Each structure stands twice: as structure tokens, then as C-alpha cells.
Image (cartoon, coloured by chain):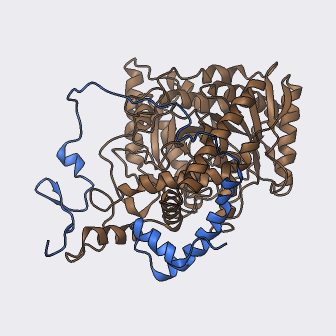
Chain colours: A blue, B brown
Amino acid sequence: MSAITRDEVAHLARLSRLALADDELDHFAAQLDQIVGAVARVSEVAAGDIPPSSHALPLTNVFRPDAVRPSLTPEGALSGAPAVEDDRFRVPRILGEEE
Amino acid sequence: MSLIQKTAAELGALIAAREVSAVEVAQAHLDRIAEVDGRVNAFLHVDAESTLAQARQVDERLAGGENPGPLAGVPIAHKDVFTTADMPTTAGSKILEGWRPPYDATVTGRLRAAGLVILGKTNLDEFAMGSSTENSAYGPTHNPWDLSRIPGGSSGGSSAAVSAYEAPLSTGTDTGGSIRQPAAVTGIVGMKPTYGGSSRYGLIAFASSLDTPGPFARTVLDAALLHEAFSGHDPLDSTSIDAPVPPVVEAARQADVAGMRIGVVKEFGGEGYQPGVLARFHEAVDLLESLGAKVVEVSCPAFSYALPAYYLIAPSECSSNLARFDAMRYGLRVGDDGTRSAEEVMALTRAAGFGPEVKRRIMLGTYALSSGYYDAYYGQAQKVRTLIMRDFEAAFQQVDALVSPTTPTTAFPIGERADDPMAMYLADLCTIPTNLAGNAAISVPCGLADEDGLPVGLQVMAPVLADDRCYRVGAAVEKAFESRWGGPLLSRAPAL
């Protein structure tokens, strides 16, 4: 069974925001196909009525008092930014030219 | 005995008694790093001046009558996946090259509060994804027992630093075995605490429901002291357990298994396991019996499906967590020439900044979570996770602790599995069930495999919040083996 084709990897790469080169697509297609084939073994387990677990321990929501407390300064928050302008993150255009 | 060969407990006592200064101890370790790390490559970042300044501060605190605890002045190597405000934090990735976080992780802050002196940041598989440290963007780390072999992973820089006497202690994180496996293959002690027992705040996330910070050391007691120093409830981590830290130091000192019921997991061992690993494991089981433990065989049938379940759950969580590396707020940005859109820049940056294993896992996770496949893959893996938790629950009704080999093989040669992901994933076969169930497990040295003379680890698994049992069994095994061997296993490692 060939679960993962080259086209499928290209689709996954687009969803994952990874601009992969052509040779990477071929390489990953073969590897992902092998990995998916191996992990598909989970389907052998009869688990129809078993509840899924997203976590090992029971989770309850944790609240803190809605009080002002020290946090990052604007300078600190921007300290690792690739580009900064007027105390803000400067980013490439998000909308098309004509929008 | 030179300062670098002393245990953390010994160093802490000497420093507290002012018989040696924290500065002298730090300098001895900096000298060792300068001498051997060119060959080992355990560290990504060392700053001698900052290390000595931290040590001077500890000496001043002690001179002022302060008592920060038993590890005050002891040097530590810190895995480069915890944020540090005064040092770069890369997670072994090009996408974070040179990044200086604006804040300290909780674990980092607690190390400082306990007076530990941070020598530097250690190498790891990129974003802690891997079992060999070959996936680091900054070159592989070498196993001090044999420099042509892997030191385990993902915390391979941390295991190598401690086994090469570059540091008496180090931190690690364990998502599928990333502390226990590197400890096993370098002949040292590594502990994965109960999930939620140590804080994830400021730990760069890989798989949030599995990631667990823990200690590396050359003795079980040292690991317990470090465990105690950085663990415990953290209001900044929503999955942190609000309960006291289990009595790990007391248990490490107790070192007694008389009357304990210990289960051997039937599903671990056999095909795919190196004979020398199994031989040392069976010796360790006999040893436990001779020390007064009652040993029985326990079956955990769902463990056979832990590896495939893990390689669906962990990549799924990783694909979501690593979406934050978007080239907008911090880290690398590539291709922003004024004509490209944010989305194009994002995709170019991620392609340039992530290595092959991270790309594989992001795409695998994206696949497992995508509509049409979700139920068959991610959903089914979550059900297997429930079954694994039930297997542990049933086992711990019969026994106090479970044992297995930590890894199926000893350290393999660098490059051997580098482009064979499935072969690499098998290194985590015995360690993964504990991550999926959230309970505690330790790896302690149990000898050298006959075939290659390389270290073998014994894994001891205990129930959630019974971390102390890992230390109790681990310390008993350590004590008995060291009296048989005439010293620690690591003393048999070739000189670097």
C-alpha cells in the first residue's frame, strides 16, 4: 500500500508552510510512506469502546486572579524580532497588492 | 581525586564547608571543557566569564550566611531547550540561531535560586526530536565511551557532558525517552519525573502532553538532589501538579529493595534486542532478587503498540507547537525582499530553518490530524494511550515497580541510522510507554555489553507521583553493582 504520494507530500508541505525543494518531496514521500505504514499498526488494536486520552493526567482549567503583574516590556518582547518599526513587529505584506 | 571526578553531593558539601570555593570548582570544569569538548561537542554555548561571575555570587551568598541548599556552587550543564535570559537558546535549530530569550524558564530560575552554576547550554536533537543528537543543526555530539558513536538523544549533549566529567550534573527533557536513553548509552543516571512534576514553563515545546524536564547525574543520589532542586508546583504551567515533590532524596539514601515487589515486563526483550543488553538486564533482575525483592513477570500487552501510537501523537502535537515559528516575532526570517507575502516568507523561512527530522514530523503530524485520517490515526493512537495507561494501572496493582532494559541496543555508530527514521525510532521502544502514561521512570547503569564493551541501562518504572520508588530501586542496584565492580561503571570508560 502506498499511502503517501509525492503529490500528497506537496499538499502536506503547503499545509505545514514548508517551501520544499523538488528533491526533498521525493525523499520525504518515500520516508513518510514507510513511517505511515509502520504506525498504521495502531489500527490492529480492537479499541472500539475505549475512550481516547489526550493527556495522561486528568486536566482541570487553572485560573489566576485577574490582577496586573509584571510582564515583558515592549523592548523585551521585540528583542528577538527579525524587523521592528515604531515599537511594533514589522512583517511582510499580509494582503495582496490590490486588496 | 580531582574536583571534576567528585559527585555533586561531595562538591556541595565541600563548598558549603568553605573547603573549596565555587569559583575553583567552576574553573576546574571550565578547564575540562576546554580540554575535551572539541572532541565531544557536548556544549553549544559556554561563557567562562559568566560562569565565574555566577560562582563568585554563590561564594558571596555563602560568605553572607545564606544557605541556598545542598547543590550551592555546583556546576551544571543546561539543555539548550530551556530559555535562559543571559545565554542564547537555540533548541539545536537554525531557526533560533543566536536567539536570546527575554525570560528564564522556571527550571532555569530554580537552578539559579538553588545556587547551581550554569556552565553553558548543551547540544540536542533539533527541538528535542531524535535519539542520537545527530539531528542538531550544530553537528553531532560524540559518546565519551567511543567518540565514533552517538551519546543518545535528544539530550545527548547533557549525557555526554556528565559522562565526560565536563559537569557533575545536567538537565534534560524526556518526551519519548530523551533522558533515559542517553543516560543508558553513556553509563550514567537519568530520570524522567512524573509528568507535571517538573515545570514546562520556558521549555521550548515539542509535544506538550509528554514533555518532562528531568536530571542527569553520575550517581542516583545526585540525580535526586537535582530533581528536588528544580521540581515542584509552578503556577506558570497549567499542567503542573499541585502536590509536594516525592521524597526522592530520602529514597536515594535508603537504597533498599527488601520486600519490594518488582515486575519484569514480558513484552520487552527478545527479537530486536542485543544479546549483551539482555544478559546485563537479566543479571540486574537476579541482583534485585538477591537483595530481597520479590520478582514476578508482568504482561502489558498494549506496550507493543506504544511506539506506533507515540509516533502519531508526538508528531501531531509537534505540528501544532512548531506553528509558532512563523518568522514574524522572533527567530530566523528568510526571503523578505519586499515583494513576497508573509505566507511566502513563512514557508521559505521554515524550509530553511528546520532540519529534515523536524520537517518529517511536522508533515507526519499534519497528516495524522487531517480530516479523513484523524480517526484512523490520531484518534486510534489516543485510544491505545488509554490502554497503555490501563496496563500500567493493572501492573501496579501487582507490583511496586516495573523493570526493563532502557534501550534495545547499546550506542550505535554515528551515521548508522541517520537517514533511516524507523530504525532510529526503535531506540525509544522501552521508554515510550511511560511518557504516554505520564508516570515516573529512571535509567541506571547495569554493566557493559559483552559484544562491544558499551554501557547498558536498567529502566525502573514507578506509578504517577511515586518517583521516589525509582530512586530507591536505582540506588539499591547502584550500591550492589558498585561493590561488585569495585567502583562506578564510568571509571571503566576510556580516558579522553
Taking the image as shown, residue B402 lies to the left or right of residue B295, namely left
Of residues B485 and A38, the one nearer the viewer is A38
Of residues B265 and B115, the one nearer the viewer is B265
Taking the image as shown, residue B291 lies to the left or right of residue B335, namely right
Residue situated furthest bottom in the rendering: A22
Residue situated furthest front in the rendering: A49
Q: Is residue B414 above or below residue B13?
A: below
Residue B220 screen position, x and y as percent: 66, 32
Residue A32 screen position, x and y as percent: 58, 68
Seen at 44% across and 20% down, the residue is: B67
Q: Is residue A76 above or below residue B116?
A: below
Seen at 53% across and 78% down, the residue is: A6
Of residues B199 and B7, the one nearer the viewer is B199
Q: Quadrant of the C terminus of chain B?
A: bottom right
Residue B8 screen position, x and y as percent: 58, 32
The answer, for residue B216, to whether it is visible in the render is: yes
Q: Quadrant of the N terminus of chain B?
A: top right
Q: Is residue B286 above or below residue B364?
A: above
The answer, for residue B496, to whether it is visible in the render is: no
